[in-house]
Image: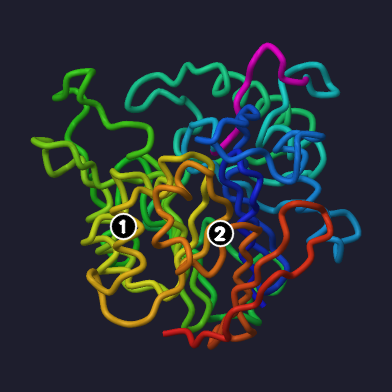
């Protein structure tokens, strides 16, 4: 099977992939500070542990079939704390005393990682130097892990399909592929491994007009037989009036990806993402919304997901959590969601012809199944 676990901590994105031959990958491991305002999702299951530790415990449970649970790949879609972990003066220090542990770096404290892939290795200076405290901490983490634990680190290569591969029995699954779609504005053309740069030359832009970190996110497609899944970090279509077309990175990404069965919403469903064009091209049967803020999802985005304006046919929408504030605003539509709380697991049957969506309780570590939807037929 192919399992895709959208882990619900209420404090950022984290997606565990268990590939058909047992190869493992983690896409993001966000960790924001606890927030109990009605405009934020409170930590799941609770505040007795940090988000990074909850993610690590979830991974270790789901990888219990391994004698020594480990991650073959870990991807950082982009350099924001809700995708890699915030660092403050209160953040814990690693056992080695060399860096802080939060989000991704804390997961690595409990689950060994063999290779990390991000968009900016090794210089971290595009489109401008990345100097946030959590990025500096992450770089110290990488160097220590490379020197002492043999960690591999690579820059994500758009257009390629041999950077993230099955490591244990690839010959048994010829229809499986992870296709790198985009990163830092470089987008796969859909032909061979060729790409093109969607953004203009950096030297031709004012500093205030540079591509945002969200726009630079890694995007990839996972395919298994007829089944396709897309995740694109926080890529956006940019809705501000008067902005040039190149600031819509969703459009070329959509053209490269094509129709999929399941996708994780771009930018948590914010107003500047998941354009009608993007949704009309992907036409997913299942939408997964990773939520931590009252701005997620935007009312207009949720309308496009629930109703057949962008594309015809049925669709099911699942959320990892919901804020009290947004639940009140979207009260008329909340009842149409298949889930508004829980770990959302997509389980693809051997060969990829069908899949189910399994919702797990995120209020405790029982991993109790609260709902099963499907089977759906892959397209």
Depth check: give the residue in front, 20 or 101. 101
Relative height, residue 313 to residue 48 (above, below): below
Question: Among all residues in the image, which is located at the extreme left?
Answer: 242
Question: Among all residues in the image, which is located at the extreme right?
Answer: 67
Residue 106 on image: x %, y %: 74, 33
Q: Is residue 218 visible?
A: no
> Which residue is at a point 39% across and 72% down the rendered structure image?
284
Is 57 on the left or on the right of 327, as rendered?
A: right
Residues at marks 2 and 1 touching, judged by CB atoms closer than 8 Å: no
Residue 11 on image: x %, y %: 60, 38
Q: Is residue 87 magenta?
A: yes
Calculate the distance from the C-alpha at mark 2 to the C-alpha at mark 1.
34 Å
Q: Is residue 5 magenta?
A: no
Q: Over which residues does the magenta segment extend? A: 83-92
Count of marks, rendered view: 2
Please identify the quarter of the rendering in which residue 373 is found: bottom right
> Which residue is at a point 79% across and 35% down the rendered structure image?
49
The residue carrying mark 1 is: 188
Is 74 on the left or on the right of 235, as rendered?
A: right
Residue 101 on image: x %, y %: 72, 27
């Amino acid at each position: 099977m192919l399992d895709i676990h959208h882990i619900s901590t209420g404090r950022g994105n984290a997606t565990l992939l268990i590939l058909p031959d047992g190869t493992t990958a983690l896409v993001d491991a966000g960790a924001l500070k606890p927030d109990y305002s009605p405009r934020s999702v409170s930590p799941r299951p609770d505040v007795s542990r940090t988000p990074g530790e909850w993610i690590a415990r979830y991974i270790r449970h789901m990888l219990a079939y391994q004698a020594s649970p480990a991650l073959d790949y870990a991807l950082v879609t982009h350099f924001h704390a809700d995708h890699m972990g915030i660092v403050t003066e209160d953040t814990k220090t690693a056992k080695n005393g060399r860096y802080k542990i939060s989000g991704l770096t804390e997961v690595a404290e409990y689950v060994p990682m063999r290779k990390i892939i991000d968009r900016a290795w090794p210089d971290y200076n595009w489109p401008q130097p990345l100097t946030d405290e959590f990025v500096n901490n992450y770089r110290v983490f990488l160097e220590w892990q490379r020197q002492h634990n043999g960690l591999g680190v690579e820059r994500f290569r758009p257009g390629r399909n041999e950077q993230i591969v099955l490591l244990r029995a690839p010959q048994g699954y010829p229809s499986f592929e992870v296709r790198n779609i985009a990163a830092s504005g470089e987008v796969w053309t859909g032909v061979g491994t060729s790409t093109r740069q969607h953004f203009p030359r950096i030297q031709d832009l004012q500093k205030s007009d540079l591509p945002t970190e969200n726009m630079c996110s890694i995007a990839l497609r996972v395919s298994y037989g007829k089944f396709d899944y897309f995740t694109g970090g926080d890529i956006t279509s940019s809705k501000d009036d008067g902005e040039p077309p190149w600031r819509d990175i969703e459009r070329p990404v959509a053209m490269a990806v094509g129709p999929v069965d399941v996708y994780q919403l771009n930018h948590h469903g914010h107003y500047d993402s998941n354009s009608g064009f993007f949704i009309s091209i992907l036409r997913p049967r299942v939408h997964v919304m990773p939520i931590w803020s009252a701005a997620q999802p935007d009312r207009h985005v949720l309308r496009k997901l629930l109703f057949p304006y962008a594309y015809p046919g049925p669709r099911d929408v699942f959320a990892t959590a919901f804020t009290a504030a947004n639940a009140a605003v979207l009260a008329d539509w909340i009842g149409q969601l298949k889930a508004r709380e829980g770990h959302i697991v997509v389980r693809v049957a051997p060969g990829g012809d069908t899949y189910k969506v399994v919702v797990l309780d995120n209020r405790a570590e029982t991993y109790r199944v609260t709902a099963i939807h499907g089977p759906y037929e892959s397209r």
